[in-house]
């Protein structure tokens, strides 16, 4: 009999749990668009098989403070059928299924949504406290393997992000001061919630992250002078060859963009930081978060977020995430042929800008999410259009 899967809750996952209370749903949401038909019961069976092989998709939260653990509930993530939908797939309108919170204590912490229509859309949703984006793709790949009648690869690693980081990086980083300007100017304090937009670009651009960072910084300086710094999420799994895990194993490197920067210099900075394995650098205080009650983290978070928006100065200017080029064939099966992939950023009022890129074939999907406080007066569309028009 296989031992029940369980792993520690890391400090980073604890932060995501607090963020889910402040800015629900705080979920990874991977959307696969396709043609053909996908039988609901066939999909349900594939999710059951893949989730048995990847118990990180069935986790619930047990314990308190530093003793918290993720434990396999044994319950298959639900598959939700949406037979009729007016959702276009290009913004958040008419998609309440994307806003549904995922419950860490009772579950489910992951689910699959089948949106019927043209195109058919299969959505994998995971609470960011249990998975990162790459982990969600690992789970999804096994679901599609099962749909094709192939054996699942599976993942049962119990390593945490902190343990993985310490395995290849012993140095610490100092937290950056709160000094960063947002890309879209002052906050409208009357607004709540988040908004996102999706743009499909037919291109295979070189140095996409460098181009996005430079153009976004220029837009920030149109509103105010100040320091612009972006976080770049980095999947740490390649630092441990052979590691398969659906857990949160992504940390970030940070790039300071100045008026003397260029996309090429930004790319050189990113390469140097990756060479020096800086994504594994922790702050000395990080692990203490495991011992702070979530309610207290939430209370402190609300005060900090309000102060950031009132002052117009943030802990970071934003995040730029790039999943690289994805193979559509990995996400096809059971009568469903994938023709497109995009991911919705896990938006938070704490982060003034979050853009995600995902490429396939000769296409790049860009999805930009902003707090509504920072997206009024058409600022979201204007910024995204400016970024896209300067990609080459």
Image (cartoon, rainbow, N blue to C red):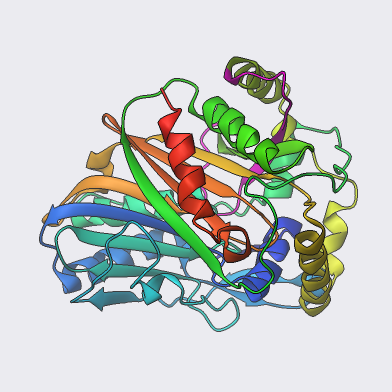
Judge left or right: residue 122 versus residue 191.
left
Q: Is residue 28 visible?
A: no
Q: Residue at x 20, y 57 (%)?
A: 147
Q: Looking at this view, is 382 or 120 the one in front?
A: 382
* 46 shown above or below 62: above
Specify whether residue 84 is painted magenta. Answer: no
Q: Is residue 41 visible?
A: yes
Q: Residue at x 57, y 49 (%)?
A: 354
* 115 shown above or below 200: below
Q: Looking at this view, is 86 or 59 the one in front?
A: 86
Judge left or right: residue 194 versus residue 20.
left
Asked where in the image residue 256 lies, by quadrant, the reply is top right
- How many circles with numbers are drawn on the protein? 0
Q: Position of residue 277 (x, y in %)?
A: 71, 27
Magenta residues (range): 240-263
Asked where in the image residue 194 lies, by quadrant, the reply is bottom right
Q: Position of residue 45 (x, y in %)?
A: 24, 69
Q: Residue at x 25, y 40 (%)?
A: 328
* 226 shown above or below 32: above
Judge left or right: residue 223 versus residue 321.
right
Q: Residue furthest bottom?
A: 106
Q: Position of residue 139 (x, y in %)?
A: 40, 55
Q: Looking at this view, is 147 or 84 the one in front?
A: 84
Q: Main secondary structure of the magenta part?
A: loop
* 178 shown above or below 294: above
**Looking at the rendering, in which quadrant would you find the C terminus?**
top left
Q: Position of residue 61 (x, y in %)?
A: 63, 75
Q: Residue at x 67, y 77 (%)?
A: 62
């Amino acid at each position: 009999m296989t031992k029940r899967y369980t792993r520690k809750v890391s400090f980073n996952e604890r932060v995501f749990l607090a963020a889910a209370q402040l800015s629900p749903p705080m979920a990874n949401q991977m959307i696969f668009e396709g043609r053909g038909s996908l039988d609901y019961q066939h999909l349900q069976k594939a999710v059951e098989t893949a989730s048995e092989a990847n118990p990180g998709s069935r986790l619930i939260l047990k314990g308190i403070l530093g003793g918290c653990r993720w434990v396999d509930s044994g319950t298959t993530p639900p598959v939700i059928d949406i037979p009729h939908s007016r959702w276009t797939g290009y913004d958040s309108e008419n998609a309440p299924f994307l806003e549904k919170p995922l419950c860490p204590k009772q579950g489910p912490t992951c689910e699959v949504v089948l949106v019927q229509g043209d195109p058919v859309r299969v959505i994998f949703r995971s609470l960011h406290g249990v998975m990162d984006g790459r982990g969600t793709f690992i789970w999804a790949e096994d679901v599609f393997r099962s749909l094709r009648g192939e054996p699942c690869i599976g993942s049962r690693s119990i390593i945490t992000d902190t343990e993985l980081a310490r395995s290849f990086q012993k140095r610490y980083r100092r937290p950056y001061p709160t000094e960063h300007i947002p890309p879209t100017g002052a906050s409208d304090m009357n607004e709540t919630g988040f908004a996102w937009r999706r743009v499909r670009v037919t291109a295979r651009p070189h140095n996409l992250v460098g181009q996005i960072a430079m153009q976004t910084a220029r837009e920030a300086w149109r509103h105010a002078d100040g320091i612009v710094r972006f976080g770049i999420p980095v999947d740490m799994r390649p630092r441990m060859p052979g590691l398969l895990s659906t857990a949160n194993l992504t940390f970030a490197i940070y790039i300071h963009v100045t008026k003397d920067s260029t996309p090429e210099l930004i790319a050189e900075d990113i390469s140097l930081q990756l060479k020096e394995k800086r994504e594994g650098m922790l702050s000395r205080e990080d692990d203490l978060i495991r011992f702070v009650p979530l309610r207290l983290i939430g209370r402190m978070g609300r005060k900090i977020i309000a102060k950031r928006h009132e002052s117009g100065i943030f802990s970071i200017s934003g995040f730029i995430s790039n999943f690289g080029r994805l193979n559509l064939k990995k996400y096809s099966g059971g009568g469903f042929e994938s023709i497109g992939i995009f991911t919705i950023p896990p938006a938070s009022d704490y982060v003034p800008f979050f853009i995600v890129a995902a490429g396939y074939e000769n296409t790049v999907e860009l999805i930009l999410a902003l707090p509504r406080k920072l997206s009024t007066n058409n600022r979201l569309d204007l910024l995204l259009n400016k970024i896209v028009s300067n990609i080459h």
